[in-house]
Amino acid sequence: MKSSSSIYFSLIINKISHTKFCENASDYVYWYASTGRYNKTECKGYYEVGY
């Protein structure tokens, strides 16, 4: 049986992983929406890629 500290640690890791995934997904959606086109090829965070 796992100790309570290892269970707590695994819960923290799972929470961090889920949060990081959500941040990455929201960054991509924000970038895609801000481009206004389909032919952009590069994502540079919150900065819009040049035409």
Image (spheres, rainbow, N blue to C red):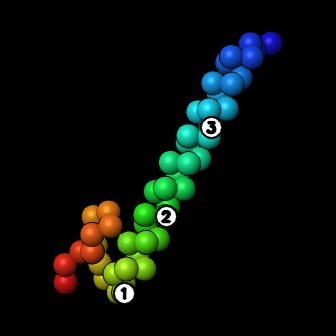
Q: Position of residue 47 (x, y in %)?
A: 27, 69
Horizontal side of 36 relative to 23 (left or right) equals left
Q: Position of residue 1 (x, y in %)?
A: 80, 12
- Label 2: state its secondary structure: helix
Residues under numbered marks 3 and 1 in contact, where contact means CB atoms less than 8 Å apart: no
Disc 1 from disc 2: Cα separation: 16 Å
Which amino acid, by three-letter code, is at mark 1? Answer: Gly
Judge the density around disc 1: few (<14), some (14-19), many (≥20) Cα neighbours within 10 Å: few
Which residue of the protein is positioned furthest toward the bottom in this rendering?
36
Q: Position of residue 11 (x, y in %)?
A: 67, 32
Of callouts 1 and 2, which one flags the residue occurring earlier in the amino acid sequence?
2
Question: Which residue sits at x=47%, y=71%?
Answer: 29
Residue hosting label 2:
26
Q: Position of residue 8 (x, y in %)?
A: 69, 25
- Quadrant location of the C terminus? bottom left
Q: Name above or below for residue 11 compared with residue 37.
A: above
Residue hosting label 1:
36
Judge the density around disc 2: few (<14), some (14-19), many (≥20) Cα neighbours within 10 Å: few
What is the number of the mark on residue 1? none
Which amino acid, by three-letter code, is at mark 3? Answer: Asn
Horizontal side of 26 relative to 6 (left or right) equals left
The quarter of the picture where residue 13 lies is: top right
Of callouts 3 and 2, which one flags the residue occurring earlier in the amino acid sequence?
3
| Residue 43 in sight | no
Residue hosting label 3:
14
